[in-house]
């Protein structure tokens, strides 16, 4: 079956127009922030993803029972963490990789109600245990020792996150 070149042009032009429109919206907003402004609150944040250039800062009042994921770029390796409110109202933080499966491209968790499910081994992990349990097949906890909280803002240091570069080097590389 021969592909008609003319019939391929319209879809290609449509894709180029969509990409140009997205870049027209996102790039000026990214460039409008100062270098010390950590959160890129653009259309990307509508996807519950944030990109940071230094320490990760999370507004406590934004945290709910639905996890919010934050990407930290360290030497072109994305290190993802998430924040979620447990059933007792406490804020829980974890790196979004499984402690047993890390290294696998599928070693990340997806929330389903009160469960977080490892996409590699399919282990279910309860929301109330996020950030508490070390070892085992669960998200890497970010404990009180690994972050600070002041004036309603949680700060996770870039030094802490950088320690996990190797564990995320193959992460979501399908």
Image: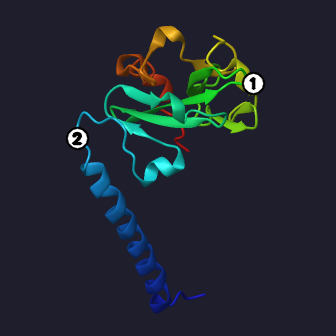
Q: In this view, does 139 lie to the left or right of 144?
A: right
Q: In this rendering, is residue 93 above or below 35?
A: above
Image quadrant holding the N terminus, namely bottom right
Residue 104 image point, x, y percent:
59, 31
Return the residue nearer the eye: 56 or 138: 56
Q: How is the image coloured?
A: rainbow
Q: Is mark 1 on a helix, strand or loop?
A: strand
Q: In which quarter of the image is the C terminus?
A: top right
Residue at left offset 39%, top offset 64%: 22
In the image, 129: left or right of 76? right
Q: Callout 2: helix, strand or loop?
A: loop
* Gap between marks 1 and 2 measured at Cα: 38 Å
Residue at the top extreme, as displayed: 145
Q: Which mark is residue 39?
A: none
Image coords of residue 120 (percent x, y) = 68, 33
**Which residue of the protein is positioned furthest toward the left in this rendering?**
34
Q: In which quarter of the image is residue 69?
A: top right
Question: Residue 58 or 122: which is nearer the viewer?
Answer: 58
Classify 28 as above or below 70: below
* Mark 2 lies on residue: 34
Q: Mark 1 points at which residue?
A: 126
Q: Which of marks 1 and 2 is nearer the N terminus?
A: 2
Q: Position of residue 42 (x, y in %)?
A: 40, 51
The residue at 45%/91% (across/down) is 6
């Amino acid at each position: 079956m021969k592909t008609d070149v003319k019939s391929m042009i319209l879809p290609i032009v449509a894709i180029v127009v969509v990409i140009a429109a997205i870049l027209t919206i996102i790039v000026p907003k990214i460039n409008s922030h100062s270098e010390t402004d950590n959160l890129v609150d653009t259309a990307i944040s509508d996807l519950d993803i944030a990109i940071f250039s230094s320490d990760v800062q999370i507004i406590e009042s934004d945290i709910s029972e639905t996890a919010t994921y934050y990407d930290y770029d360290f030497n072109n390796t994305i290190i993802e963490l998430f924040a979620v409110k447990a059933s007792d109202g406490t804020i829980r933080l974890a790196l979004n990789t499984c402690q047993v499966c890390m290294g696998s491209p599928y070693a990340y968790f997806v929330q389903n109600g009160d469960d977080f499910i490892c996409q590699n081994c399919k282990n279910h992990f309860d929301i109330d245990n996020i950030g508490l349990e070390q070892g085992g097949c669960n998200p890497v906890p970010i404990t009180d020792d690994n972050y600070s909280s002041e004036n309603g803002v949680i700060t996770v240091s870039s030094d802490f996150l950088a320690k996990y570069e190797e564990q995320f080097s193959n992460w979501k590389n399908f």
